[in-house]
Structure formats: C-alpha cells, structure tokens
Amino acid sequence: MIGIEAVTKKFGDSEILKKIDLTIQKGEIFTLIGPSGSGKTTLLRLINLLDTPTTGKIVFDGTDITDDEKVRLSVRRRMGMVFQKPAMLNTTVAENVASGLKFRGVEKSPIESRVQSALDLVGLPDFSERKANTLSGGEMQRVSIARAMVTEPEVLLLDEPTANLDPVSSEIIENLILRINRELHTTVILSTHDMIQGQRLADRMGVIMDGRMAQVGTTNDIFYQPFGKDIARFVGIETNLKGVVKTNDRGHAEIETGGAIFEAITSMLPGQRVALYIRPEEVTLMLPESGSKKTSARNQLFGTITGIVPFGPFIRITVDCGSPLTALITRRSSDELGLTVGMTVIAGVKATAIHVLPDTS
Amino acid sequence: MNEIVEGFSQAGSLIVTLNPDLLQIAALSLYVSLCATILAAAITIPLGGFIHFHEFRGKQALITLIQTLYSIPTVIVGLLVYFLLSRSGPLGFLGLLYSPEGMILGEAVLIFPIILGLVITALSGISRNIRDTIVSLGATEFQSILEIIREARFAIMGGVILGFGRAISEVGVAMMIGGNIRGETRVLTTAIMLGTGMGEFSLAFALGIILLAISMIVVILTKFISRRYEV
C-alpha cells in the first residue's frame, strides 16, 4: 500500500530520519513505537505528504510521489491524519467534520448525512451543533477521528492519538481504532511511545530509535526477540545479562552468567559470548519452604530480594541470584508471599522465556 | 466644564430635532469612512494573506515598514494625496480634489497600513497545528488560505474596526482633500475644527459625542453581523 524507500529527512543540519525503509500492507494496523523525539511524527508527516523527504522516495498504491502539488494533493486526499494535539477549527463540531468534504467539493446534501454517520462512528451523535473548542481533550480527539474518517480514507494516520488523554478516553480511542480497521478495513498507521498500546493495537510494529528503523516485525518478534539492548530496554525487558554458552544440546543450551547458569533455547554454540534478555512478567517467585513443588520452568535460582518497587497494580522485585533478575508480580502475590527486602526466594524462568542474542559489546 | 455638559444637551437636541445640517454632515462622515474602510479592507485582506503565506527576501523589512506607517501623520497623507489629485498631479484628470470620493481615497490610503499590518499579525496568530490540519484535510493552497483567513476573522475584524475608527476620527486628510465645504465635503471632524475655531465649544463637543455614538453603532452592528453569520 505504502512503500518508503531510503527516506532521509533533515531539518537544517540535524538528520531526523536516517535511511528509513518500510512497507505498509493494505488493511493492517502498523504501529511506530519509539521514545519521544525519535522521529515518529516526522515519518508520519512525510507519509501524509505534509513535508517532503530530503532524499529517498515514497510510493503510495503504485503512485510515485513527486514534487508536483497536484499529485500530492490527490494522494493526500486518500488519507486522513489525526494529530497528537487535536486542532479544532473555531466553529461547530459539524462544520469541523464537514471541512474535508467541503475541500473536496462534495455537495451540501450528502455532507450532512455523512457528517452525522462519522459522528455516530466515534460515539458523539449529538455533538453537531456544539462549539468544537469547548470540548474536552478526549472529545476533541474523537471529533478529529470523525473529521479524518468522513472522507472514507484508505489510510488513517494517527500521531500519538492518546498521549494527552486520561486512561478512559484512551481506551475509547483504542477501541475506535480497532473498529475502524476491522469494520471499515482502513489501513491504520499509528505512532505511540506506549508499548502496551502498541501491543494491544498492532498487527506489525516498527521500532524507531534515534531516526533509524531499528526493527520491524510482529509484536511478538519485538517483545520477545528484540534486536539488541536499546530495543530490549525500550520494550520493557529489564533483565539483560551477559554470559558464555557452556553446552548446547540440539538448541537447548546452558549459559553461564556471572554467578548463575541458565538454560535457554538458542542455536549459539559453546564458547560464544551472548546477551540474555528476560521480560519481568516471565519471572516467577517462590518461597524456599514451599517444598519441592515440581514445575516446568527449567531455571530455578536461589536469590535474595534487593528491591521492591510498586508499579501500578504490580510490584517490581529485583532478586540477586548471582546475577540480577527483575520480576513483575501482582500486589496480591507479593502480599500472600509476604515478600520483603533481604528475603531468600527462588526465581523461576522458563527456558523458552529467555531471548538469546550474540553479545556485540 | 460647562461646555461639556452643554455639549451633551446640545447633542441631544440636535439629534432629537433631526437637524438637517447635522444629518447631512453625519451621513457624509459615515459614508466616507465606511467606503474608505471597505476599499482598504478589500485590498489589504488578500494582500496580507499573500504576504503572510509567501516567503520572499525583505519580508521582515516590509512588515516593519508597514508597522512604521501606522504612525504616519494624517496631514502628511493629506499632502501626498493632495499632490496626487491636484490638477497638475498624476490623478488630476479624475477631478477628485474637494470631493467625497477624493476623501474616500485619502482615508483609504491613511488606514491601509494599519489594516494590512493587523491582517498579517492576525494570520500569524493561527497556530501551525491548524495550518497542518487544514492541509491534511485535503485543502488546496487557495482553500487553505481562505480557511486560515476565516480562522483569523475576529482578529482581522478588530483591525478593520480600528481602521474605521482612525478614518472617521481624523481631521488632516478630511480637511486637505475635502476642504470642509459646507453641504459638500464637511464631515464631523472638520465641523468640530470649525466650531472650535469660532468659539462654539459646546457645538464642538456635541458633534464629538455624535461621532462617538455613530462609531458605537457601527461597532455593535459589526459584532452582531459577525456573530450572526459566522459561528
């Protein structure tokens, strides 16, 4: 649907995007994730043809995007974009939603019914005559989505659509995005710095780090098999250990890190230096006195709790097992086990939950 | 102080009795200033849009020049337009000197920089976000300029009202181009000058009060119309 080929964007001397290659498929939800300032907004603006790339090219549904404003306008009119900060025209909600249709020269009578069905879609059917600038942030963002969707775009671009919203409004917007994609089959490209949102919505994800497309893949690829330390840290992998492969029996390896031995699945050969990545929610904790409860988790490591930090409904616990491990467990589990700093626990990790990459450092 | 109090009562009686001289003078004042404002606005709004939306060398210098011209003395504008319209001047063949139409031209020249400058300021006040949103919604370049002018309408209207205020209240251009000919080019301000010169202070005050009353009606009507027709 959209091809981005070796696109670079410079503002003055600073290179915001560095040789981005990316293909967006028709009908998918593609999420761009990355820290603030990594270039997500710039890339979306290039796709919406609001800016032009410094080098490289963009192809939309087979059309090469040139500098010709006529071509750019006709392609831009097949897309809709929702910005991080919704900008409302100083008029009614209905007039706001109608503006894209007016620009396209649609006649008056169909406009009214199309505006109404767009407002129905976003769940604001009675808002037509309200002044747009008096709405709440969440309502404005829904009006922005109605305004973009009223022209029935083939591609909907959303730049951090929930970044400034409360959790309830964010959830409404997320569900709306899913509905638009599933029911109207609109291709969606969304940027976010919220991994959970990315995971919830995306069919595929692209991680932008410092202007580069660091990794593109399914959410599972990126969450469990990140290409390197920066991505791992960004997607919430807290445990990152260095080690050496000791044995490897048909992919089932033993890896020695500072003070512990881990079993993991990898094709790395004995002697190779590797990095181990473990997601905190994959680490379980057990009390030693609970006896030898059999478990399928291959790695059972004795350790001492060194830190307990509340994290929303969860608690993040660091355990020193010779090497440091981080576990994310529920508050309730923590209370039932009576965990405190200094206690000895057994940390359990399945061999399949350890992601092994060559150590490049 | 007495003159002011008397001025109020005289203004009242002039209005109540529908003094024909006064009506003619007031109507001409309104006609000249409104026409001058409409003429200036009709040129400055698109021109301001053009200047704002195009990047060219010397743009900032031009804006500084426009803003400097806010302070041009009315008598200087009067003098310039006088030379233009005088019999030997380049527009002398139009025979506009000492006519209401000549006054309209002079007032329009006077308020041109004010409205132009305030249109540019009003357009700069529209955020980048709004501009991007409009372009993203599929507007052509022309449509987006129109839409942004529409967004800035209240600030632009403020500039236009200020231009009208300067046109109806100034005396330099009205005197030099109009000549204060009774029944032909006498407007409220030139009549006030004449009254003051002849020692009829309360009449001068009365005319001043009437001028402000007219101005107030125009401002209220403008607001009413802009609320009514644009949400």
Image (cartoon, rainbow, N blue to C red):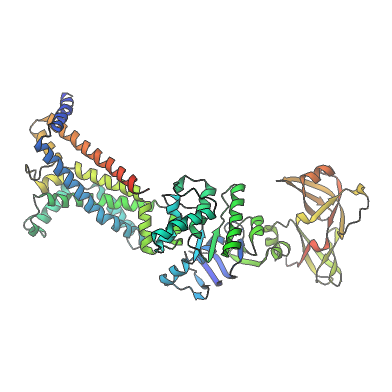
Q: Residue at x 37, y 61 (%)?
A: B143
User: Outermost residue toward the right?
Assistant: A291
Quadrant containing the N terminus of chain B is: top left
Q: Position of residue A60 (x, y in %)?
A: 52, 72
In this picture, residue B15 sits left or right of residue A186: left
Please indicate, yes or no, whether residue B9 appears anywhere in the rendered image.
yes
Q: Residue A228 or B213: which is nearer the viewer?
A: B213
Rendered image quadrant of residue B183: top left
- Residue positioned 78% across, 46% down in the render: A307
User: Horizontally, is A354 left or right of A302 in the view?
Assistant: left
| Residue A303 on image: x %, y % | 85, 51
Q: Is residue B110 visible?
A: no
Q: Is residue A35 above or below residue B154?
A: below
Residue B217: image location, x then y, percent: 24, 39
What count of labels does the image hold?
0
Residue that appears at 43% across and 56% down: A112
**Vertical position of residue A130 compared to residue A356: above or below:** above
| Residue farthest top in this picture | B2
Residue A158: horizontal and vertical position, in percent? 55, 59
- Of residues A270 and B163, the one nearer the viewer is B163
Left or right, A245 with reference to A194 = right
Residue A33's image quarter?
bottom right
